Image (cartoon, grey):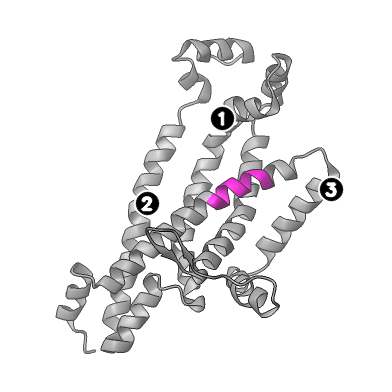
Amino acid sequence: MNFNWAFFFHYLLEPSSIYLHGLWLTLSISIVAQIIGTTLGLFVALGRLSSWRVLRALSSFYVWVMRGTPLLVQIVFIYTALAAAGILRFHDIDLGFMILPGNVQAGIIALSLNEAAYMGEIIRAGITSIDRGQTEAAKSLGMTPVKLLRRIILPQAARVIIPPLGNNFNGMLKSTTLLSVIGVPELLLATQMVTSATFRVFELYSVVALYYLSLTTLWGFLQRTIEARFSTPFAETRSKAPRGRLLTSLFGASP
């Protein structure tokens, strides 16, 4: 095997501008898509828990479709099929400080819509894990549904939601590689571009594998820190403040 160690370490320790741009795209697309997907997932979860039968049916249908079809198919469908049918074409957008290409827009939308289906189920599980007695007690105090969700349900449900959310973001970092099929120059496509110019396939794919491994490992450390922060029982955390002690006494939790 003719492995060029000098070439390998050069691209590993001194990545070219193409690599750095691909790395930036991978991170930025992952973060934006995860934020949008989590936000949409909250609405999907609320729809699945709604007392309105039509809303429950629509939310369930959305989850069924998005989880039952491959992400790669969804990406190609949103970017290529919609344009071919004359329904939607993605054009570059000038944001003033940067140009947002159409294929990047389509990639973010596809990843976000796919993530929303999974996050919807995760958030729904977190919400249903909360004791119904707390919801009834809050309603008896006159709390609106929005305030109930923001102050009582979501802070406690976060303990259930955070671990799988972190795992999903880990997967999101790797799922961005699928955007290479629609020409998004993320880290994988950047590697393919450099490979076509240098023909050092084994070295460059070893480099990109280590890049992804580094990203997921760093996120793993951060995820454990976040999980440790939210592992403290809700009542114990809230009881440090006067309002927390009031809620603790109202909801019957141990101080």
Query: Which of the 4 image quadrants contains residue 6?
Result: bottom left
Which quarter of the figure is the N terminus placed in? bottom left
Q: Do the residues labelled 3 and 2 touch (CB within 8 Å)?
A: no
Which residue shows up at 69% across the image and 65% down it? 68
Of labels 1 and 2, earlier in sequence is 1
Residue 38 lies in magenta, yes or no? yes
In the displayed structure, 169 sits above or below 88; it is: above
Classed neighbour count for the residue bearing mark 1: other residues with Cα under 10 Å, few (<14), some (14–19), many (≥20): many
Of labels 3 and 2, earlier in sequence is 3
Q: Which residue lies furthest to the right in this view?
A: 53
In the displayed structure, 239 sits above or below 228; it is: above
Residue beneath label 1, please? 156
Query: What secondary structure do most residues of the magenta stretch adopt?
Result: helix
Residue at mark 1 to residue at mark 2: CA–CA distance = 23 Å
| Nearer to us: label 1 or label 3 | 3
Residue type marked 2: Trp
In the displayed structure, 105 sits above or below 255; it is: below
Magenta range: 36-44
Residue at mark 3 to residue at mark 2: CA–CA distance = 39 Å
Residue beneath label 2, please? 219
